[in-house]
Amino acid sequence: MSTRVDGANRAVLTLLGLALLAAGVLGLVLSLGGFGTDLAASPVLPDQLSRLAADTSWFWPVVAAACLVIALLGLRWLLAQLRTDRVTRLDLTQDPRDGLTTLHAGALIDAVEDEAGALRGVTGASAHLRGEDHPRLDLTVDLSDRADVAEIRAQLEELVIPHLRQAADAPDLAVDIVLRPGKGRSTRRDLT
């Protein structure tokens, strides 16, 4: 998932959670007599709405249809959260008549993370391979406060990325590198 989608999910879930919490607290305070005993003893639905529900045959089917639409939208959202574009294996087969050659993405990612993490000034590295048809590697490198950003970027471009492309037998493999020097700052470089 992209950062934009993750942020939208967090925002929507936070707003929905706050709205449900507010409704629950309001209902609890109302039922305990926080707004007076008359309101605490009154029915949940006003008399007009109760009569409408009892007198019209279409009321409850419309309510059921609305609930079904909400449930289907929720299911669609849940299934979208489970979908991912992460790659688990790369097919390195040149000619299918010669057999099948696959490379586990986890091994490739571990090698990239280890090689990038071993550079002087790097405090951590994480990589993710995504995209089935056109694979792309996302590499995030955390740097120490005193790291030489230009030197580390050059080493990534001249050593780590060529090793990755050679191992994956993909000279055109796109790589997105995010350098995070210290805390709070970010430098993004797109190598295509």
Image (cartoon, helix red, strand yellow):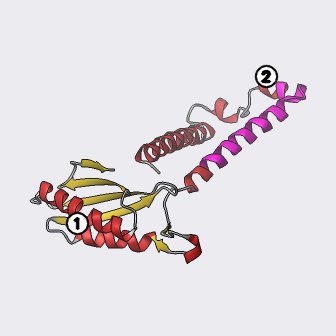
Relative to residue 74, is residue 142 depicted above or below? below
Dot 2 crowding, Cα within 10 Å, few <14, some 14–19, many 20+: few
Residue 112 is labelled as none
Residue 129 location (% of width, % of height): 42, 61
Relative to residue 54, is residue 110 depicted above or below? below
Instruction: In this rendered view, identify the residue nearer to me: 38 or 50.
Output: 50
Q: Which residue is mark 1?
A: 159
Seen in the image, is 55 located left or right of residue 101?
A: right
Residue 59's quadrant in the figure?
top right
Residue 165 part of the magenta-drawn span: no
Seen in the image, is 138 located left or right of residue 183?
A: right
Residue 70 location (% of width, % of height): 68, 40
Disc 2 to disc 1, C-alpha distance: 75 Å
Residue occupying image coordinates x 70% and y 35%: 41
Asked which secondary structure carries label 1, the reply is helix
Examine the rendering and report whether any part of residue 99 can be seen: no
Dot 1 crowding, Cα within 10 Å, few <14, some 14–19, many 20+: few
Residue occupying image coordinates x 43% and y 44%: 7
Segment tinted magenta in the rendering: 52-77
Q: Which residue is mark 2?
A: 48
Q: Which amino acid lies under the numbered mark 2 shown in the image of this protein?
A: Gln
Seen in the image, is 168 located left or right of residue 157?
A: right
Instruction: In this rendered view, identify the residue nearer to me: 184 or 148.
Output: 148
Instruction: In this rendered view, identify the residue nearer to me: 14 or 137.
Output: 137
Q: Which amino acid lies under the numbered mark 1 shown in the image of this protein?
A: Leu
